[in-house]
Image (cartoon, rainbow, N blue to C red):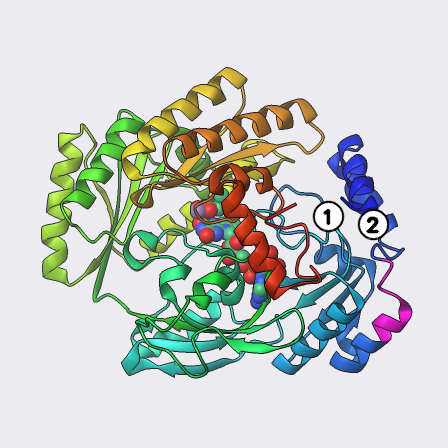
Amino acid sequence: MSCHHLMRRAFYSKHTFSQVKQLSRCWSSAAISPKVTPGFVAEVKNIVGGSNVSTADAVRDQHGHDESYHGVEPPDVVAFAESVDHVSQVAKLCNDNGVPLIPFGSGTGLEGGINASRGGLCLDVTKMNNILAVNAEDFDCQVECGVTRVTLNNYLRDTGLWFPIDPGADASLCGMCATSASGTNAVRYGTMRENTLNLEVVLADGRVINTAGEGRRTKKTSAGYNLTNLFVGSEGTLGIITKASLRLSGIPEATISATCHFPDVQSAVDTTVQVLQCGIPMARIEFLDEVSIDACNKYSHLDLTVAPSLFLEFHGFEAGLQEQTKTVEELVKMNNGSEFRWATDVDERNHLWKARHDILYACMALRPGSKPYSTDVCVPISNLPEVIVRTKEMIKEAGIIGPIVGHVGDGNFHIFYPVHPDDHETLKKIKDVSYEMALIAMELNGTCTGEHGIGIGKRDLLVKEIGEEGLNVMKQIKACLDPNGIMNPGKVFF
Ligand SMILES: Cc1cc2c(cc1C)N(C[C@H](O)[C@H](O)[C@H](O)COP(=O)(O)OP(=O)(O)OC[C@H]1O[C@@H](n3cnc4c(N)ncnc43)[C@H](O)[C@@H]1O)c1[nH]c(=O)[nH]c(=O)c1N2
Ligand SMILES: CC(C)CC(=O)C(=O)O
Ligand SMILES: [Mn+2]
């Protein structure tokens, strides 16, 4: 462990979140990585242009944290790339000088992925925001790394196509590749893994590769190793993704949303399993426990019954949907669920899903002034009731507030703990319960993260999940692609 790392660790363990935030600002006036010299900054300016480089505190602070509870760790310098050539030259410069290089998509991550724990250069790619091609007949497109999900969908509106992966946040599409994001539509449309056809990646030494070969954008390939999926979920530790070829889907002819509630968690999850077993191609099946529903009612002005609930969405042809909704209604009834509350008109549907996506902010409003500590585990769906019920017991025993929401159709769920950053006692309880929950998920053949990634928060869990040997192979791959260890150091592994 480097001296700098030890210093940081000691520092963070002794200070409150707000002190750290304040002090890291003072710190930030001095270079964290001694290799970021004025000469180095001048060379970066030569590459991307003076106006695309900043060492201002405000800019570094803004780039030193994501939407998670982790404190601010600003980089020494922020550079804005405008082309692949910029990215390639900056990578080579960092590599030659041993300067940490942290790719920045849009900063919506939830595991501290962009924190500059070891200082260095943050490469912001938001200016690379061109939609390069839409091949409507082939259901695919190619975008530069800074294009966000909402921008792409607005652009596609008149084509009858859309990009369905929806983490709620308006993340950059290559940031979504980097974290292997998914969200509410994954039960029907898959995750970033299934929807990425090819990536252009700049490696640590500046080389540029296309993971499936230049220009390839097929739905299938058996050509060699799957480099595309090596980079999906690599969290900026293997290279900078500069372009993505993505699969698109047809906008469904008809869409219906509904909510219903249940006497307990088990019946909501049993219903989900039975719906999937019947082969109903649900677009969304989201679980919200009674605490989340209460938070949603208050924050998003809904008037739902405060009970474990499902938010459902059906996509398809009008006639088919009638059959599907009828079957699901019957299954809900069989499991003692309530009547459906329908949301058929577009405004009503948007309001419902906005409320679901705003859950993070709704939960924080339960404790004004709090920050969100979010968790993310995924298990085989039949084990979902057990992990949720056991976690709820731990939450009750610890005396903390922990609303649960889940992409139940995938066996994936989150708990958001609204916590005051200075409340160490509660924070410790939350960390303990979260850790235990991840261990339970793994004991039940699950993973410690379904969609948010490892970042800095789950590094010790990764080795438990993958095993020493598996982790060693990951480290060997990293060493092969990034021998100087400059790519987002301190993320995914220690
Ligand atoms: C309110 C809310 C709700 C949700 C979520 C966030 C928030 C704020 N998320 C998480 C989030 O949307 C997700 O992590 C994004 O995919 C990250 O994209 P950014 O562009 O913001 O990456 P960001 O800039 O935060 O970076 C994330 C990581 O990727 C790396 N990175 C970014 N761009 C890169 C590039 N071009 N090349 C290489 N590495 C790059 C970074 O270095 C970092 O390690 C989520 N997610 C989810 O899966 N399901 C969900 O339901 C939700 N819900
Ligand atoms: C845990 C949350 C902050 C985000 C998320 O993944 C969700 O709302 O589904
Ligand atoms: Mn989620």
Q: Residue at the spot x=59%, y=29% of the render?
A: 431
Is residue 346 visible in the rendered image? The answer is: yes
At numbered mark 2, what does the secondary structure look like: helix, strand or loop? helix
Q: Which residue is mark 2?
A: 25
Is residue 280 rendered to the left or right of residue 458? left
Query: Where are the magenta residues, as a range?
Result: 34-42
User: Mark 2: is the Cβ under 8 angstroms from ligand 1?
Assistant: no
Q: Is residue 124 depicted above or below 235 in this figure?
A: below
Circle 1 crowding by C-alpha within 10 Å: few under 14, some 14–19, many from 20:
many
> Is residue 305 found inside the magenta-colored segment of the image?
no
Q: Residue at the spot x=66%, y=77% of the render?
A: 88
Q: Amino acid at mark 1?
A: Val
Q: Which residue is mark 1?
A: 72
Circle 2 crowding by C-alpha within 10 Å: few under 14, some 14–19, many from 20:
some
| The N terminus sits in image quarter | top right
Q: Earlier in the sequence, mark 2 or mark 1?
A: 2
Query: x, y (%) of residue 240?
Result: 60, 68
Query: x, y (%) of residue 77?
Result: 79, 64
Q: Is residue 234 depicted above or below 210 in this figure?
A: above
